[in-house]
Image: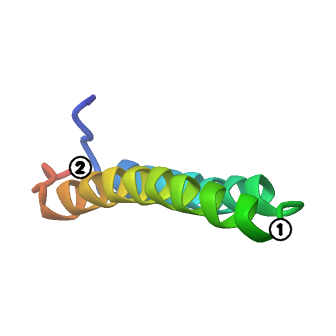
Amino acid sequence: MTTLTSDQEVDRRLAELDALAAQEWTAYGDRLRDLQGREYETEEAAAWDELRGVLDTLEIEREGLRAAPTPPA
């Protein structure tokens, strides 16, 4: 990961991570939209596992950004 050098860059990256999370939630919904019954149940479990993995990865990066000290501008 590239070292971020300012609070402004951290804020920008946090906003990007929020946008990525929103995109992932949309993709999750799109993936399940037309499914029903057993097909939905099976696909939803896989889709949820994938979504949780991505969201967990994004959260780890968020936590790192919040915890990292930034040098003065």
Q: Which residue lies furthest to the front in this view?
A: 38
Sequence order check, earlier mark of 2 and 1:
1
Question: Which residue does the image show at 48% across and 50% down from the upper left?
Answer: 50
x, y percentage for residue 41? 64, 67
Q: Which residue lies furthest to the top in this view?
A: 2
Which residue has dot 1 on it? 36
| Res 60 seen here | yes
Mark 2 or 1: the one toward you: 1
Kind of residue sitting beneath label 1? Gln
Horizontally, residue 26 falls left or right of residue 72, namely right
- On-image quarter of the N terminus: top left
Horizontally, residue 32 falls left or right of residue 2, namely right
Question: Which residue does the image show at 42% across and 60% down from the upper left?
Answer: 52
Which numbered disc covers residue 73? 2
Q: Residue furthest right?
A: 34
Mark 2 residue crowding within 10 angstroms, few (<14) / some (14–19) / many (20+): few
Kind of residue sitting beneath label 2? Ala
Q: Quarter of the image holding residue 39?
A: bottom right
